[in-house]
Amino acid sequence: MLLEKAREHADEIRGAGAEAAKLALAAGVPVYYFDDSLGDGIIKEMPDGNRFRIAVTGGKAVVTEALPPKP
């Protein structure tokens, strides 16, 4: 039932996530997310617009690749 509701409200959930990320970046806090269009892995977006692919190794985030800023 819960997964069914999540599927029904997928657009609203994505919108809430996007709004939360926008607020965090405006507050000066980096955000972490997955973006299939950028391939596998975790994306770290900084408030200045820089983005990185990261891996978590030994409990620490390690940058594996610099990515272009969002258009």
Image (cartoon, helix red, strand yellow):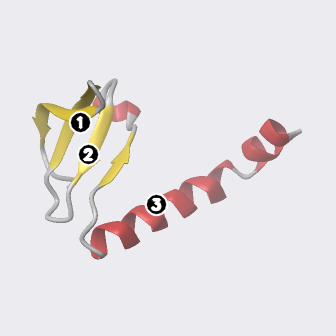
In what element is the residue under mark 3? helix
Q: In this view, does 51 lie to the left or right of 15?
A: left
Q: In this view, does 26 lie to the left or right of 20?
A: left
**Residue type at mark 1?**
Ala
User: Is the Cβ of the residue at disc 1 closer than 8 Å to that at disc 2?
Assistant: yes
Q: Nearer the viewer, residue 57 or 47?
A: 57
* Picture residue at 40% right of the left edge, 62% below the top: 21
Q: Distance between the residues labelled 3 and 2?
A: 14 Å
Q: How many other residues sit within 10 Å of disc 3, few (<14), some (14-19) or many (≥20)?
A: few
Q: Where is residue 17 in the image (x, y as percent from the top left)?
A: 51, 58
Q: Position of residue 39 (x, y in %)?
A: 31, 26
Q: How many other residues sit within 10 Å of disc 2, few (<14), some (14-19) or many (≥20)?
A: many
Residue position for label 2: 44
Residue position for label 1: 61
Residue position for label 3: 18
- Mark nearer the N terminus (1 vs 3): 3
* Picture residue at 62% right of the left edge, 55% below the top: 13
In what element is the residue under mark 2? strand
Q: How far apart are marks 1 and 2 (CA)?
A: 9 Å
**Residue type at mark 3?**
Ala
Q: Distance between the residues labelled 1 and 3?
A: 22 Å
* Picture residue at 18% right of the left edge, 47% below the top: 51
Residue 15 against residue 43 in the figure, above or below: below
Q: Where is residue 52 in the image (x, y as percent from the top left)?
A: 18, 41
**Residue type at mark 2?**
Lys
Quadrant of image for the N terminus:
top right
Q: Is residue 42 left or right of residue 16?
A: left
